[in-house]
Image: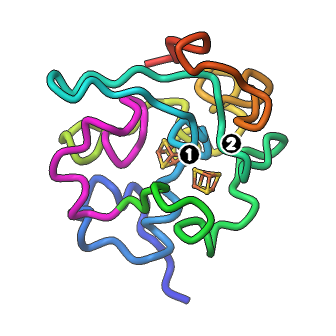
Amino acid sequence: MPQSSPNFWKNKPLAALSPDEWESLCDGCAKCCLHRIEDEDSKEVFTTNIVCRYLDQDVCRCDDYANRSINVPDCVSVTPELLEDPYWLPSTCAYRILAEGKDLPQWHPLVSGSTETVVSSGNSIRGRVVCETEADDPEHHLVQWAS
Ligand code: SF4
Ligand code: SF4
């Protein structure tokens, strides 16, 4: 298997990344698995602490990643094409950050060398959410996440 060059995300456009490089950009924060409320006119996005039922909250990974679009039809698979206007992704999402021409933050696992920095920096949703099967009105669950 070809090895990625150090700092590959700085040296290649997103569309040129290998599948492994692309997947490694995901920091595992799981903020994209939260329910959001979007103002259709302003495109402003409000996030909640309600999370998809398929998320394994202990490890912040999808329980059925291969079938996520079947299980949850509005679960969006991030692609370079979708990143042309990435306003709907969390502001800390690595895909959005790179699409906006910025560099990864120090807490990103590819920079820090550890997935624990996602938690210690306050960017993981681990232990801070409620499953959608147990939540009431989303407007009662609005949360400002780390940005
Ligand atoms: S918000 Fe971005 S970095 Fe975080 S889990 Fe979702 S795709 Fe990965
Ligand atoms: S189906 Fe999986 S990837 Fe999609 S929102 Fe739910 S937990 Fe996240």
From the top left corner, tell me how far across and down residue 103 is, in percent: 31, 38
Residue in view at x 57 percent, y 35 percent: 34
From the top left corner, tell me how far across and down residue 119 is, in percent: 69, 28
* 12 to 127, vertically: above or below: below
Instruction: Quickly name the residue at label 2.
Output: 115
Q: Which callout, 1 or 2, points at the residue further toward the start of the chain?
A: 1
Residue in view at x 28 percent, y 46 percent: 98
Ligand 1 lies under 8 Å from the Cβ of mark 2: no
* 21 to 58, vertically: above or below: below
Ligand 1 lies under 8 Å from the Cβ of mark 1: yes
Instruction: Quickly name the residue at label 1.
Output: 27
From the top left corner, tell me how far across and down residue 27 is, in percent: 56, 45
- Is 141 situated left or right of 133 in this image? left
Which amino acid, mark 2? Answer: Thr
91 inside magenta stretch: yes
Categorize mark 1 by other alpha carbons within 10 Å: few (<14), some (14-19), many (20+): many
| Residues shaded magenta | 79-96
Give the SS element for disc 1. loop
Please identify the quadrant where the C terminus is shown: top left
Which amino acid, mark 1? Answer: Asp
Categorize mark 2 by other alpha carbons within 10 Å: few (<14), some (14-19), many (20+): some
Residue in view at x 27 percent, y 23 percent: 39
From the top left corner, tell me how far across and down residue 112 is, in percent: 58, 38
* 77 to 125, vertically: above or below: below
Q: What number is the disc on residue 96?
A: none
Residue 15: name its quadrant. bottom left
Mark 1 touches mark 2? (CB < 8 Å): yes
Marks 1/2: CA distance?
A: 7 Å
